[in-house]
Amino acid sequence: MRSFRHRLLHPLVLVTAMTFVLSGCNSTAAPQEPQTPPSVETPAPPKKEEKPKEETTPPPTETPKQEQPEQPQKAKPTETKPAEKPPAGQPPELSFPDIEVVGEPESVAVLVNKQRKLPENYQPNDLVFPNVPYLLPEKSEKRKLRKEAAGALEQLFSAAQADGVQLAGVSAYRSHAYQKALFNRYVKKDGVEKARTYSAVPGTSEHETGLAIDVSGKDGKCAATSCFAGTKEAKWLDENVEKFGFIIRYPEGKDAITGYIYEPWHLRYVGVEIAQEIGEKGITLEEYSGAVPVSTPTN
């Protein structure tokens, strides 16, 4: 019986041992499973908490705020406005009141003088280059005349040449800006009152109409100066300009009416009919237009 019981217990022991071993393998596998927690640590929420980096965005918002202090600098230009005082002291010509603005600046008979001026931004729209000799460089703006006056000037120069008189243009059209600079220069030299006897306040110059031109002999001697009066060129002009629609705009002895000293070189186009009537009557453009005489110039 003991041998039989012993035989029975032996396999039971073996079964128990095998059971223990198998259960031991499962327990060894369990400790290996904790290795998975590292994978659980992969949730990089902490890394996503780099949101503090978003705090770097405020700096750019702070930089525009630094531009705000520049705003007071924009106010500085207002402080520079006093710099306008120098030019304000130079142009006395701009302070002349009671100068009437002409209503028809395009008319060939327009009267422009010390009491009547062209509109501020007026510029003739039909300026051309007459085909006549000039003392000026080619393509100079001061060579230009309005188209009708330019054609008449070409005829006048041709007729003079046929009579043995060689003429040349000195100065024709002048822009408002040029006339302003020219007048200011004369003011610095001779003073306002004296300058007004031989130069026009900007806007009141006939040269700005595109209908006036100063001429001289082809040699350029006595160009636009008083000594031109005794030349053969001046005599020919005095006797012939009316045939071509021009007048000596500032004739001798008419200073009290025109406001300018005698200028035998200054021609003004008004058309043949008007020019001949003015010549026959020995009057000025002011008298022809029925305008009030200009104040007597101060010499």
Image (tube, rainbow, N blue to C red):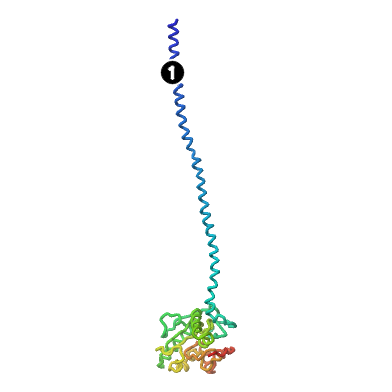
| Residue closest to the far top | 1
Q: Where is residue 54 in the image (x, y as percent from the top left)?
A: 51, 48
Asked whether 241 or 13 is in front, the reply is 13
Q: Where is residue 61 in the image (x, y as percent from the top left)?
A: 53, 54
Quadrant position of the N terminus in the picture: top left
Disc 1 packing (10 Å; few <14; some 14–19; many ≥20): few
**Image: 96 above or below 36:** below
Amino acid marked by disc 1:
Met
Asked whether 249 or 161 is in front, the reply is 249
> Going 47% across and 93% down the picture, which residue do you hit?
238
**Image: 36 above or below 276:** above
Question: Is disc 1 placed on a helix, strand or loop?
Answer: helix
Q: Where is residue 251 in the image (x, y as percent from the top left)?
A: 51, 92
Is residue 146 something one can see in this rendering? no
Give the mark count. Answer: 1
Q: Where is residue 288 in the image (x, y as percent from the top left)?
A: 56, 90
Asked whether 200 or 73 is in front, the reply is 73
Rendering quarter of residue 105: bottom right
Is residue 24 something one can see in this rendering? yes
* Residue identified by numbered label 1: 18
